[in-house]
Amino acid sequence: MAEGPTINTIARHAGVSIASVSRVLNGLPTREETVRRVLRAAEELGYVPNSVARSLKSRRTNQVAFAMADIGNPVYLAMVREIQPVLRAAGYRLLLHSTDADVADELDVLRGLGERYVDGLIMIPLRVTEGHLSALAAARAPVVVIGSVPEGAGVDNVRTDSRTGVRLALDHLYGLGRRRIAFVNGPADTVPGAARAAAYREALDALDLPYDEDLVEVGDFYRAEGARAVRALLDRAGDVDALMCANDLIALGALDVLRRAGRRVPEDVAVVGMDDTDLAAVAWPSLTSVSLGSARRGRAAAELLLDRLENGEREPRVVTVEPRLAVRASTVGARAAEEYGENGAAGEAGDGGEGAREAGRTAGEEGIR
């Protein structure tokens, strides 16, 4: 197989020196006539620059990696849709890496930054271990972490406020007259699991509702596990009148189980998810969900990383994206949900649930409760 053109053949074709060709192809100052001759020769010969060799020389790859737990999770897909265009506009390609929430894999990704196969990394570790903190401190390329990290971790960080998000959901359910509000969580040793478990207890306290272990079930952040957890919960606490689910996938599993059990949603059991993914709006019934701003978090992470790549050393920054509640049919019924609009909010946390109580009155008038 014949080899492609090289700078040697371009130099001969253009009638200039090899050094001149090298200067033109690397964008260095050169006489205008020489630039025209070299570029014309390169085009005529079909020359394609060796980007690998160029990146070795410049120590830049113009690639950024995004490491996430599950590439099929709609939360991460929403982030990708925002991250990719921001990076593309700045001349970077996005590489996706699914870790399956494996700590060892995440640490390998962090340590691999020393090999310079990417210029920077955005990652979402479900668990933040001492190993993560050590690897972040030693990282040889910029890193942005989406999700909470300990104070003083020394890394750019984009996070959300799960505490306020859960409070919004429970205020809403309380305002609808629900008092047996169960909680279905993911693993408690994960960052989101721990935050949402603590937020659930705080929200109950704020509403003067007792914490009942029988109303709490821990599974995983997947639809099938959500279904299993809800079946177990209903077996021991069949009188629940509301389910607070730690993400939308768990909530979708809950809807499946309740439908098969003959429990009407929301008449018998109201259901709230978290993340407000695309699936929430198309579920049946449509799912009330706490939006944690997945798209906004993705965009903020990309912008933080670009700023670090372009401006180098600076103090780490923390960006917090505030949650909001998207009210749909799984808590107020289809007709009442229309009054909120597809992206309607039920009021702010700490307002005593007045916005939610108004929804409860509307739902009650329609015979939904």
Image (cartoon, rainbow, N blue to C red):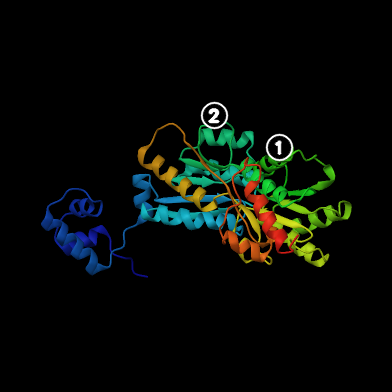
Task: Tell me the kind of residue under disc 1.
Answer: Ala
Which residue position is annotated with label 1?
A: 206
Residue at 20% of width from left, 61% of height from top?
39
- State the CA–CA distance, disc 2 to disc 1: 30 Å
Residue at 21% of width from left, 48% of height from top?
28
Q: Which of the numbered marks, if any, corresponds to residue 246?
A: none
Q: In the rendered image, which quarter contains the C terminus?
A: bottom right
Q: Residues within 10 Å of mark 2 (few under 14, many from 20)?
A: few
The extreme top residue here reads 152
Please identify, in this view, whether the residue under mark 2 or under mark 1 is nearer the observer: 1
Marker count (numbered): 2
Q: Position of residue 331 (x, y in %)?
A: 69, 58
Q: Position of residue 309 (x, y in %)?
A: 39, 42
Which residue position is annotated with label 2?
A: 152
Residue at 55% of width from left, 32% of height from top?
153
Left of 162 or right of it: where is 14? left
The extreme right residue here reads 236
Label 2 secondary element: loop
Q: Residues within 10 Å of mark 1 (few under 14, many from 20)?
A: some
Residue 222 appears in the figure: no
Image quadrant in which you'd find residue 312? top left
Label 1 secondary element: helix
The extreme front residue here reads 365
Residue 148 appears in the figure: yes
User: Looking at the image, is mark 2 or mark 1 earlier in the sequence?
Assistant: 2
Query: In this rendering, is residue 85 above or below 301?
Result: below
Residue 86 vs residue 38, the one in the foreground: 86
Query: In this rendering, is residue 120 above or below 41?
Result: above
Q: Position of residue 365 (x, y in %)?
A: 71, 61
